[in-house]
Image (spheres, rainbow, N blue to C red):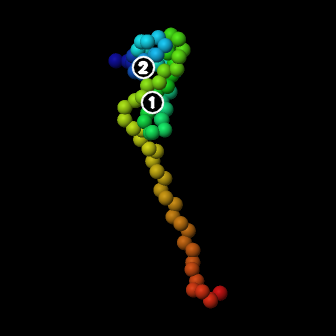
Amino acid sequence: MKLRRSQLFMPEGYCVKCKTKKEIVDGVEETMKNGRKAIKGKCPTCGTVMFKILGGKATPPPAAAPAAAPATETKPPGNK
C-alpha cells in the first residue's frame, strides 16, 4: 500500500480565532525552554499562528566526550 501526501500524519490543533480543531499548516517542530517538544504552524483558514505542545520531553543531544586536560609536568621547586 502506497502512502500519499494526504495520508501522512498532519498535526491537528485548536485555532482560537476560528474556535475549531484544524490541521496545522507549515508545522515546524520546536523545543521549548523547559525541554518539551511542540509544533508551531498556521491555521489553513485564517492564517493565525497555532501552537500544539507534544507529549514527552525532548531527548538531549548526545554529549561530547569530555576533553582530557593536557598533562603538565611539575618540577620540584628550586630545580631549573
The percent position of residue 79, horizontal first and vertical second, equals 62, 89
- Rounded to the nearest angstrom, the CA distance separating label 2 from label 1 is 11 Å
Check disc 1 and report its element: helix, strand or loop.
Answer: strand
- Which residue type carries mark 2? Gly
Q: Residue 53 versus residue 9: which sits nearer the camera?
A: 53
Q: Amino acid at mark 1?
A: Ala
Q: Which mark is residue 74?
A: none
Label 1, on which residue? 38
| Residue 61, above or below 22 | below
**Outermost residue toward the right?**
80
Q: Is residue 46 above or below residue 40?
A: above
Q: Residues within 10 Å of mark 2 (few under 14, many from 20)?
A: many
- Residue placed at 42% from the left, 17% from the top? 14
* Marked residue nearer the N-terminal end (2 or 1): 2
> Which x, y percent locates residue 24?
46, 19
15 lies left or right of 2:
right
Can you identify the residue that label 2 sits on? 13
Going 49% across and 38% down the picture, which residue do you hit?
Answer: 33
**Viewport quadrant of the C terminus:** bottom right
**Height in image: 9 above or below 57?**
above
Would you identify the image quadrant in which residue 47 lies?
A: top right
Report the side of 23 relative to 1 (left or right): right
